[in-house]
Image (cartoon, rainbow, N blue to C red):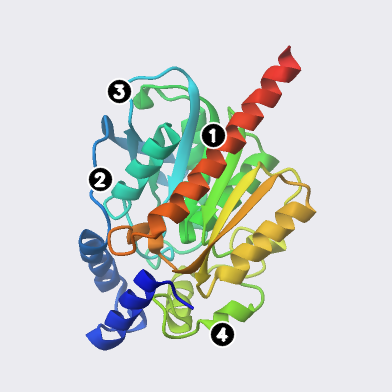
Amino acid sequence: MPRPDAAALLAYLATSGQPGIETQTPEQARAGLRESVKATDLPVGEIAVQQPLTIPTRSGEIAGLLLDPRAGREPGPVVVWYHGGGFVTGDLETHRGPAADIARQLDLPVVLVDYRLAPESPFPAAVEDAEDAARWVASRPDALGRQADALVLGGDSAGGTLAIVTAMALRDEAAAVAVRAQIVIYPGTDLSRPYPSQQEFADGRLLTEAGLRWYYAHYRADAHDWRGSPMVGDFMGLPPAVVLTAGEDPVRDEGRAYAAALVRAGVQTTFLEAAGNIHAFVLMRGILPSSRHDLARAFAALTATLRSLQAATAGKQD
């Protein structure tokens, strides 16, 4: 059952007459998301650094945004965050507020990546941009004004998928610095087979089965390629993970399956579920205030993971 604030939102949407995303063009969906975030999310808030970035990739340059609660800092971990939006929508503006909050809660710099979107740039364009951006941050570019001694990869929804496949790519071919941890929020992880939650929440939620089909039809990922369906890949040797799912979400079971597979592969994993919450709650912290607690739990778990890893490293050096 949806929690009270989610239930109130779903009741409103059921009577609002708003068209489903599957009836829209990508341009309409992108504009609609930008407008809705203004009404549903929290303001960016106080943040010391909001610096536009130009990130080189194998296919040209993409935009990025550095957010940091501190004007200056010593070398340390840098979070690379991939925004959600089904690989079709979302950008630096829709996720500026959440990224700033992540930076504040973790007390770490965050680089928000504006990867290419489908259908103009279908799979694997987003995957390539995500990997290239992480490697660029790891190379300690002067443009950041701070040095990364490790990466933390994270993302919400489609961005969570990109964080997973980037972690896999950087495991197989290391970047200039190691990936210390990953945090993924309601990721899609498997196009190769159905999951019960896809039917359980096919209708009546913010993300529906028809909406999922619309996103993936534009993205055109290969369901049997680990870059499109991480669950068909190998998770041995991935960095410690925090996985947060939404309880009332068609892709809930894909996130659960990913967390379980990590545990079977021997990866240190913290699994959390936002019971009664719906997909995309990262962008609805204003009208779904209970979501703030869900996110705070996940970021506290990540902080604890990073501290334990740092302590273990210090112990080995002693």
Kindly report the distance in space between the C-alpha atoms of the residues bearing marks 2 and 4. Answer: 35 Å
Q: Amino acid at mark 3?
A: Ala
Q: Which residue is mark 4?
A: 199
Q: Secondary structure at mark 4?
A: helix
Q: Which circle marks residue 71 in the picture?
A: 3
The label on residue 121 is none
Residue 10, compared with residue 60, is above or below; it is below
| Alpha-carbon span between mark 1 and mark 3 | 19 Å
* Residue 66 placement, left or right of 225: left
Counting residues from the N terminus, which is met first, the one under dot 2 or under dot 1? Answer: 2
Q: Between marks 2 and 1, how big is the CA–CA gap?
A: 23 Å
In the rendered structure, the answer to whether residue 197 lies left or right of residue 213 reads: right
Which residue is nearer to you in this view: 229 or 267? Answer: 267
Q: Amino acid at mark 2?
A: Val
From the image, tell me which residue sits under label 1. 151
- Residue type, label 4: Gln
The one nearer the camera, 150 or 166, is 150
Displayed quadrant of residue 228: bottom right
Q: Which mark is residue 44?
A: 2
Rendered location of residue 164, percent (x, y): 59, 52
Q: Could you tell which of marks 3 and 2 lies nearer the N-terminus?
A: 2
